[in-house]
Amino acid sequence: MNSMYFTEEHNLFRKSLQDFLQKEVVPHIEKWEQIGNIERFIWKKFGDMGFFGINYPEAYGGMNLDLFYTVILLEELQKINSGGFAAAIWAHCYLAMTHLNAEGDEAIKQKYLAPSIAGDKIGCLCITEPFGGSDVAGMRTTAVKKGDHYLINGSKTFITNGVLSDYLIVAAKTTPELGNKGISIFVLDRDMVGVTATKLNKLGWNASDTGEIAFDNVKVPLSNLIGKENQGFSYIMQHFSLERLIMGINAHARAEYALEYALKYMSERQAFGKTIDKFQALRHKIADLYTDMEVCKSFNYAVTSRLDKGDYVVKEATMSKLKCTKMADEVIYQCLQFLGGYGYMEEYPMARLLRDSRLGPIGGGTSEILREILAKIIIDKKEYKPAT
């Protein structure tokens, strides 16, 4: 392991996480992939192990560790071959909980963040809309202040943990005429009157429950506003760096897993009197794919190091997601080919890996949107700044 970034403590953490996943998670993966959701008991086990709190404050039950512990969590979640399970865990831990921790007041942190770290509450982040997609500023969901509460109306879609979570972090327009300057963030309880969710069926990520959510005159107390009114867009943008980097790290990790699996298969599979890892055409292909994966991994570690020090890495994180998700799709496509007919069989891991990986260039901002953001930074010299 790269000793420039990972200490002995990191390596011990990785080993204990691997053992936990093999013992507590892997035996259930096939069932969860079949039923399309994750049973509740595993969340509590993650909480008891402290895995939800690794980079959160000790005051709420966290461990306040550096971001490379998060990298380890993300990498190992990709290597048990359920993109849906991995997504459900990191969407709770790094999408929903990030907003609670960064912008929530003390009451919100006690009510939602502490139980989230403990594994007693599951969260989801609701930004994407049926008509909005990657265009966050174009959202239509509104929150109108009425005395001691807001009335929220609208809908969200493609929400990971959208059906089975206990609370929802929701972006809505409090001052629609201000466009993206009029967005605020709220925390809603699942059982609030007017909140309904419908499960969506997907090409991959089958173990995660992905929902379309409707808000019909949902009464939300003023105290459930997270951060300041009309500051939501800045909060969302600020945390996109972490989300994009997470998806870049996920991509290099699943590519590495695919290559390791393919290499083991090729060392055992024989054709024309020798194992197929001895054929030059395949060897050279592996060399190219492995190089692409390693370059992405090294870049991601460097960006993680900067983010951990507090640098604003929106450009680099955007590059990470754009490049790494494309790389992972290409690597996994080729690794499936190395398996021949077995690559196409459901009982071999590559079919699911291919489906799960394909979400990479779509979710959390499409590659097309990311290219436009990078073009603005590189060509137009646009500067994105942290929220104040």
Image (cartoon, rainbow, N blue to C red):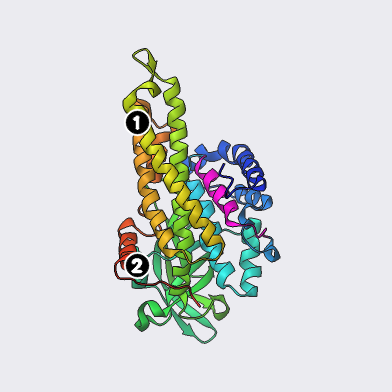
Q: Which residue is depicted at the point 40% across and 40% down?
A: 291
Quadrant of the image occupied by residue 177: bottom left
- The location of residue 376, given as percent across then percent down, is 31, 68
> Mainly helix, strand or loop, the magenta region?
helix
Q: Residue at 52% x, 76% y: name it.
A: 220
Q: Is residue 80 left or right of residue 8?
A: left
Which residue sits at x=41%, y=71%? 384
How far across and how far down the image is residue 231, in percent? 47, 78
Q: Are marks 1 and 2 in contact (CB under 8 Å)?
A: no
Say what secondary structure mark 1 lies in: helix
Which labelled disc corresponds to residue 239? none
Q: Is residue 22 visible?
A: yes
User: Residue 217, image x and y in percent?
Assistant: 44, 75
SS at badge 2: helix
Q: Amino acid at mark 2?
A: Ile
| 60 over 144 or under it: above or below | above
Q: Residues within 10 Å of mark 2 (few under 14, many from 20)?
A: some
Q: Is residue 309 above or below residue 287?
A: below
Q: Which residue is mark 1?
A: 284
Instruction: State how far apart marks 1 and 2 are (Cα).
Output: 36 Å
Range of the magenta residues?
62-79
Q: Is residue 129 above or below residue 264?
A: below
**Looking at the image, which is closer to me, 324 or 103?**
324
Pointer 2: what residue? 377
- 69 is within the stretch colored magenta: yes
Q: Amino acid at mark 1?
A: His
Q: Position of residue 45 (x, y in %)?
A: 65, 48
